[in-house]
Image (cartoon, rainbow, N blue to C red):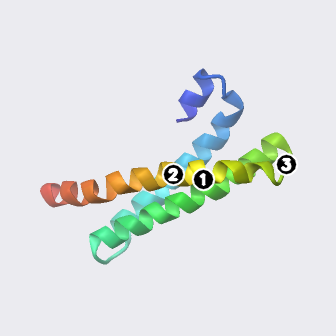
Amino acid sequence: MAFFDLFSGWAAWAPFTFVIVGAMGFLAGLISEKVPGKREWVYTLAVVVALIIKIVGYYFTEVILYGNWIQPFGSVPGNVMQVVIAGIIVVPLAGRLMKRAG
């Protein structure tokens, strides 16, 4: 994602995206692998944690880049939709893939 930012005219966002998406992936993966419990619930928890990281991370990124504490609220619905749609696709798919792999 950070490479996309670099090459698509959003270079100022690249370092923030690298950190935010990296944290999302790391923590979602850590939760998915280490937290005990019913897998669908664990995967859902991982998606919720990724959602929180994305919302908070990009909110403060916009505050830094634009110097405004109100404007970033406008991007929250889009960030929520991205993660929710990804979660709707990934949670059932991950469960099926893990059953086949294990």
Closer to the chain start, of discs 1 and 3, is 3
Real-space CA distance between mark 1 and mark 3, rounded to the nearest whole angstrom: 18 Å
Q: Which mark is residue 77?
A: 1
The x, y position of residue 48, in whole percent, is: 48, 65
Binning the other alpha carbons within 10 Å of mark 2 as few (below 14), some (14 to 19) or many (20 upward) gives few
Taking the spot 20% from the left edge, 54% from the top edge, the residue there is 97
Amino acid at dot 2: Met
The percent position of residue 45, horizontal first and vertical second, equals 43, 69
Q: Secondary structure at mark 2?
A: helix
Q: Is residue 62 left or right of residue 94?
A: right
Q: Amino acid at mark 1?
A: Pro
39 lies left or right of 60? left
The disc placed on residue 96 is none
Give the residue at the far right of this rendering.
67
Location of residue 68 with respect to 2 vertically, above or below: below
- Tell us which disc is closer to us: 1 or 3: 1
Percent position (x, y) of residue 90? 33, 53
Dots 1, 2 in contact, CB < 8 A: yes
- Say above or below: 8 vs 12: above
The answer to the question of whether label 3 and label 2 lie on touching residues, with beta carbons closer than 8 A, is no
The amino acid on which the numbered mark 3 sits, given as a three-letter code, is Asn
On the image, the x and y values in percent for residue 29 come to 40, 58
Residue picked out by circle 2? 81
Foreground: 70 or 24? 70
Mark 3 lies on residue? 68
Seen at 75% across and 45% down, the residue is 62
Label 1 – label 2 distance at C-alpha: 6 Å
Q: Secondary structure at mark 1?
A: helix
Disc 3 or disc 2, which is closer to the eye? Answer: 2
Nearer to the camera, 89 or 58: 89
